[in-house]
Structures are given as C-alpha cells and as structure tokens.
Amino acid sequence: MKDAENPTIYLKDYTPPNWLVEDVHLTFRLAPQATRVISRVRFTPNPDADGRAFFLEGEDLRLIWCKINGEDVTPQVTTVGLTCEVPEDSFVWEAEVEIAPEANTALEGLYMSGGMYSTQCEAQGFRKITYYPDRPDVMAPFTVRIESDMPVLLSNGNKVSAGDGFAVWHDPWPKPSYLFALVAGHLVNLPGTFTTRSGKEVELNIWVRPGDEDKCDFALEALKKSMTWDEEVYGREYDLDIFNIVAVDDFNMGAMENKGLNIFNSSAVLANARTATDANFERIEAIIAHEYFHNWTGNRITCRDWFQLCLKEGLTVFRDAQFTADMRSEPVKRISDVLDLRGRQFREDGGPLAHPVRPESFQEINNFYTSTVYEKGAEVIGMLKRLVGDAGYAKALDLYFERHDGQACTIEDWLKVFEDATGRDLAQFKRWYSQAGTPKVTMREAWKGDCYTLTLTQDLPDTPGQTDKQPQVIPFAIGLLDPSGEEVVPTTLLELTEKEQTFTFNGLAKRPIPSPLRGFSAPIIVERKTNNAERAFLLQHDTDPFNRWEAGRQLAKSALVNMIGDGADPDPLYLEALTTLITDDSQDPAFRALCLGLPSEDDLAQTFADMGQTPDPQAIWEGREALRGAVSDALAGDLATLYNRHLVTEKFRPDAEQGGKRALTNSLLVLLTRRDEGAAAQGQYADADNMTQQMGALSALLANDLGSLELASFADQWAHERLVMDKWFMVQVLQARPDLAAGVANALTQRPDFTMTNPNRFRAVFGALSMNQAGFHHASGEGYRLMADWLIKLDPVNPQTTARMCSAFQTWRRYDTDRREMMQEHLQRIADLPGLSRDTSEMVSRILG
Ligand code: TRP
Ligand code: ZN
C-alpha cells in the first residue's frame, strides 16, 4: 500500500513532455481562506515527444471550472492531477481553482506568514497553486495579475501596471513553474539601484515587515557586490528592470531564487550589529550571492528534471564559495567549507542516506536537497576546474552560457561543454556524479637514493544499492618539504585515475615530508601512516594554509582519540604546537580561531566507528571537556593578555578583519571562563554593543555552567526580536550538559513563544538537540524520545522540515545495542504512523534500511 501511495521515480524513465507551454496568464484573487487562481495557458505539441496524452499536475486544489478553447470540458481528476481529452494541435487551457493559503502550514505553494502571502514552488509546490505541467523542462513566459487590498503586490519580472487593489507583472524570460513567485503584504522596502556594465539601470528592493527596516542595509550591499562580481568574474549581467528580495519568517530553507523575486527566510536577510553575529552576516552575504547567481545558473539555464538538481545547486554553491573567498579570506572559507563537508556530507555518504551527487531515484524530491547534492556537487566542480585549469574552466563556462541559455539541461550537457572547450575526455570523471560514497585514498611512501616514491590506492566503499565501484579521477594536490621546513616541491597536481598508481619525485637531497591533498583538492579521506611529530612540523612549516590547519586538526584528533579510548593524558606536543600558534600575532586571528576549534563530537564518533570501535558519546564529551581544560591550562598565562589584545572595541563592522578578531576572542573567552569564574565573560556581556560579543559571552558562560542571570536578561532584552530569540533557544540546548539537554529542550517547548509552525524556532530547539550529541545520545534515551515525539507532532504540520530533521537518527547503526535499539524503536514508531507524509516516510525507511 505504502509503495502504491509513494511511487518511486527513476531517472532512466525520463521522457520529454508531450505538450509545451507558449505562455501563461495567471490571475490571483487573494483571500486567506479561499484564494481563486484563474489560469490561461497556451499549449502546443512538443515535436520531440511521442505522445499527445495530456496530464496536468495538481494537488489540494478545488477545481471550479475549466475550458479548452473557450468550451467547458470535464477532465478526470485524481489526488495528483488531471487528464483530459485535448485537440490534436495547439489550444488554450483555462481553469479556475480555489486554494486556502491560511491553512497551508507545509509552506509549499501559496501560504501565509506573519499576515502576508508568500509562495514557495521549488521543487513541486506550483501544483498546489493551479493545474499545470509542473516540471522544470516546461518553460514559459508568465503574466501575473494579483488582486488584493494588500498594499504591496509582487511577482516575477517587470511591473506592467498597478492600481487600486491590483498589480500586473510580466516576466519575459521563459521559466519553469518552480521559479514562479508571488508576495502580497504590508511590507516596507529599502530601495537601491544598480547600473549594469552595459549601462542598464536596475531597481533593487529589500522588502520586510515594518519594524525590520533597520536590518536591510547589509543585504542590499551584499546584493550589489554579488551583481558586480558576477559581471567581473563570469561576465553575467542582470536581465530585468527590477530585482526584489523579500524576507519571510516562516520558511523551510534558507532562500529561493524565484526569477526577479527572491524570497528569503528572514534569518538569511535581516541583520544589524545589535541583532546579528559575524557568522550571520557572512551567511547572509553568501546566501544573497547564491540566490542572485542562480539567475544564470539555475534560471536562464535550468534543469531538465530534478535528478539534475546538482547542475544548478552544485555550480551555484561553487560560485558563491568563490565569491566569499574573494570578499573575505580564501583559506578561512576553504577550511570552514571542509569542516562543513566532513561534518555533514561525509556523514551522509557513510550512512544509510548515501546517494550519488546525481541521484537515480526518489520518492520525494524535497529529500534530495542534501549536502551531497549541494556541497559535494560543488566539490566536483572544484575538481573539474583544477583538472582543466582556470583558463579551461572560463572557456567552458562561456560556452555553457552561450550554448544552453534558455534551456533545461542535464549533467551530460554540462560535461560536454567542458569536453568541447578543453578537448578533455570526461567519461571517467563522470563517475563522480553516479557513484555514491567517500573515496578513501591510502598513501604508501618509499625513499631510495634521491627518489621519493608515492603509491596511491583508491577505494570506494559500498553504499545502499551500489557495490563494486570503479576508480574515479582524483586530483591530488601535493607539496614536499625538506626536514628544515623548506618547500622542495611546490604544489603539484597528481591525477589518480587507476585503482593504484605510483608517482616519483627525483633529485631530492633528503627524504621529504609530504603535504598531501593541499587545499583539500578532492572530497576524499586520505589514509597515511604518520606521527605527531610530523603533524606538528606541518602545522609549523607548511606553505599551504589549509594543510597547516589540517595538521593541527589531526593532532587534536589523535590526542582526543587517545584520551577517550585509552585514558591517555593530553598530548604535550599538541598543546605546545597550539600554544606557539595561538600566541603568534603574525597569524591571522580568524585562522587561529579555527585552530582552537576541536573536532566535533560527531567527527570523533565517526572516527571510533571507522576504527571498529563503538563510540561512547558521554566519553567523547568528557574527553573534549578535558582537552579544553588542558588547552586552557597550557595557555593560562597568555589567555587574558591575548584576549585583551584582540578584543575589538571600535565601532562594529561586519567584515572579515574585525570578525576574525571577534572569533578569536570569543574562543579564548570560553577558555578564560574556566579560570576566572566568568569575570571576563560577564564583562564582555555587559559591555557588548553587538550580538557577536553578547552571544559569545553568553555562550562561554553557559558552557561553564554559569550565566543564568545573563540568560534571563537576554530574554527580556530581545523578547520582541524573533531571530534573536531563536539564538536564545538554541544556545541553551547546545550548551546544556549531556544529562540535562533533553530536559532543557523539553522545557523550552512549553513556552508560549515556542511554535511548531515556524521552522526556525523548531530548528533552534531540535536542530540544537541533534547537534548536542552527548545530550541527544544520552543513555537515558530521553533525547531520542523527545525528538521522535516532536517529529511525530510536526509531520502533519510541515512534512518537509520533519523529513529533514529525521537525519538526526541517520547514524543509529554505529552505536551500542541499547542505543541502537532505542533509536530503531523510535524510527519504527514514526514509520508506523497512519497518514505519515511521503517526505518523512521515505526518510525513515531509508534510515532504517
Ligand atoms: N533552490 C533553493 C536554493 O538552494 C533552495 C530550495 C529548494 C528551497 N527547495 C526549497 C528553499 C524549498 C525553500 C523551500 O537556493
Ligand atoms: Zn541554490
């Protein structure tokens, strides 16, 4: 029964649409409980299709009437759409449907949030607005008339006309339905203008609810920077007279690239010094850029079908990472991205949810907006760029835009452009798109005469539904240092294409120390016999900033593994190397802050699992606490001086330079708070005129079981700011001791300002609970129970967010029998629920395996 309800869709079954759309006219008569949508669509036969059968997707719609060429028709309507007898040749379809935006808590289709109307159509939300071929390979120009007494009425494209109670918008660029958007509300705007390289004036607006006007400046500046950058780096200009961004409180993801009308989770737009942290500013800048860049990589060139999602997402993530590296610090961006990749994508790739960058089947496409599609998808493009070089990449992209503008494309089209532009055969490289799993590359070394020999072996583990994998093309950047710390071989790109391959370096005076996988040139795991002395050496001498950080990280990890696994003392070599680095003021503060970060609890759990041991979440937590204590002791004498020397007291600027210093001082503050009973943190809390320092202080206090006064005063101060209160909810759960975390989370859900209909608030509590690994996995099972109880409550309200959050359980198989059985039981409890959403049902059954 389940399978009949939730059919699996396969990439191999793709067929072109029978009918194409020439143009679309939509009229919206907005009303919270009964909105009428009248559509007029001109269909024409697709010369590339075999059939003429006519099917329109449609869900949760009340069909009032429909006509073909002006004549009433009676279609066969099901829960997923309608079929109808249609003429042989082009015809006009008209229909009127009724929908209820106010009842729409799933936040897909047309819904209401904070008194305004908003839409979210990607991936398959347009079918909840009207009957339509809701697939990305059907592209058409849209004209939209909105009738409402709301003062601000927005849709895609340029505004054609407006008057009392209506507005008409026309988008000349053919687009798929997932890029449709409509907003109506009592909104205020921060206006701006941008003049394109060819001299076209574009009107810009950031639209927000009254009260949020003071949090728009940064987003507007980020938008202008993005527009300039895309012209300068990719030669891409904006193509409409107006570009609107709207902030919405209730939103399932970060933001959406609707043509000319980007809609953002308010957390991804709104910021000022007092309410937003440096990390928030950086994220906002990156998301504004990401959505803007989609205008070319996603909108002008879109996806043929949803299996090709990485075509737009991998590329656009890659582009926004390049942008951030240019705006801020390249090494810091790279290190943060790798942390995120290892923390989320490697975890996904190593568990039951593993899937290829281009999946081959799905039940619910919303479940494939994953770290694999996005982040590994971007890594694949980074590898391609390394392999063909900067000039080859630039040539290929020019060809991509020239050849495919206005089309709905595939990964095959994308790779062909690279083959044609560079002459390189990418048949083997394509395996990155079809084989799931993180490749493991083992290094073996030999030294003889003046020759250093390196043998690299690659292994790709089995993943659900995939075994016996073929070798991939792995760009392996490496440098060699001599024992004095001198670089004797600068970064060299080795191309590993076989299962095993040997590379030699001749003419070396002394046995070199390798610096492998510089810049993290491929999303792989490197296995190599090494020792801490060598890691400390690289931390000190490597010329590659990524690998210097990596060496420090490996030192920390091996120290922790020994402490947790064998009860060893903290490694003095690590403490010494870290102290040298942290006290060295010639080093970038942001880099030092990154080096102070310890491997995450989840990273350590995975490490133990990889060594064939059962991770103990409580022991991991204690080990990290102990190492933090040892670092605090090792730096003891220097902590206060370092902290004071880097404390930013000038007027807040959300830039990388000040942000780096605040990141460093906040990291030091956590260590300092262990020693001064909270004096410095209380001081910083009291003096803070910005959220980075206020939150940093609060967090340091809570991490040391202090801060109850500050916690209370924070809530009073910020009760009226939803986004700030999200931080308040989150930090308590994140910083709660393992035995208290579930209780803290539970208490927060009892508050009147906790709500399930706002995904940000729900994630503040339950996203934090899943990140607090020792709390979530506490032996009492309370973390599991609370999470499952609330996922069960959320599913009927918001399936998309429920399904995403099920991934908290994805690592269940790595734990001991007790924990495994508890998690399995809760997953089964969810799976057995009558009426469970397709989203959650697919996720839970994949996790259970
Ligand atoms: N395409 C959007 C992006 O990455 C993300 C997105 C996909 C999305 N589906 C969504 C956003 C649903 C909100 C809701 O830029
Ligand atoms: Zn995107």
Image (tube, rainbow, N blue to C red):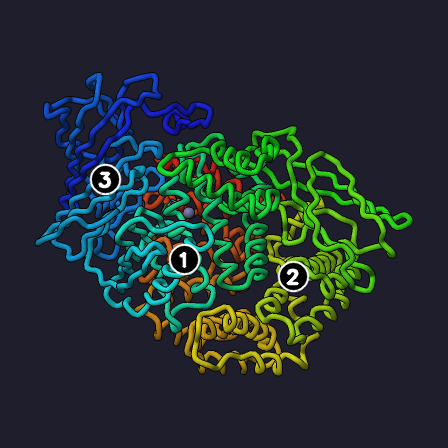
Camera-near label (1 vs 2) is 1
Q: Tell me which numbered mark, 1 or 2, is placed earlier along the sequence.
A: 1
Quadrant where the N terminus sits is top left
* Residue behind mark 3: 142
* Residue behind mark 2: 545
Q: Tell me which numbered mark, 3 or 2, is placed earlier along the sequence.
A: 3
Mark 2: secondary structure:
helix
Front in this rendered view, residue 547 or 193: 193
Front in this rendered view, residue 240 or 82: 240
Quadrant where the C terminus sits is top right
Image side of residue 818 versus residue 106, left or right: right
Residue 75, image x, y percentages:
19, 22
The residue lying furthest to the left in this view is 164
* Residue drawn at 31 percent across, 62 percent down: 752
Q: Is residue 98 above or below residue 618?
A: above
* Residue drawn at 70 percent across, 57 percent down: 554
> Which amino acid, mark 1?
Ser
Q: How many residues crowd around disc 2 within 10 Å: few (fewer than 14), some, or many (20 or more)?
A: many
Marks 3 and 2, how far apart in space? 49 Å
* Residue drawn at 38 percent across, 56 percent down: 227
Q: Is residue 784 above or below residue 188?
A: above
Residue 809, image x, y percentages:
52, 45
Q: How many residues crowd around disc 1 within 10 Å: few (fewer than 14), some, or many (20 or more)?
A: many
Front in this rendered view, residue 242 or 112: 242
Image side of residue 80 versus residue 75, left or right: right
* Residue behind mark 1: 226
Q: Quick check: can you spot residue 481?
A: yes
Q: Is mark 2 within 8 Å of ligand 2?
A: no
> Which amino acid, mark 3?
Phe
Image side of residue 380 versus residue 274, left or right: right
Residue 805, image x, y percentages:
45, 47
Write down the quadrant of residue 540 in the picture: bottom right
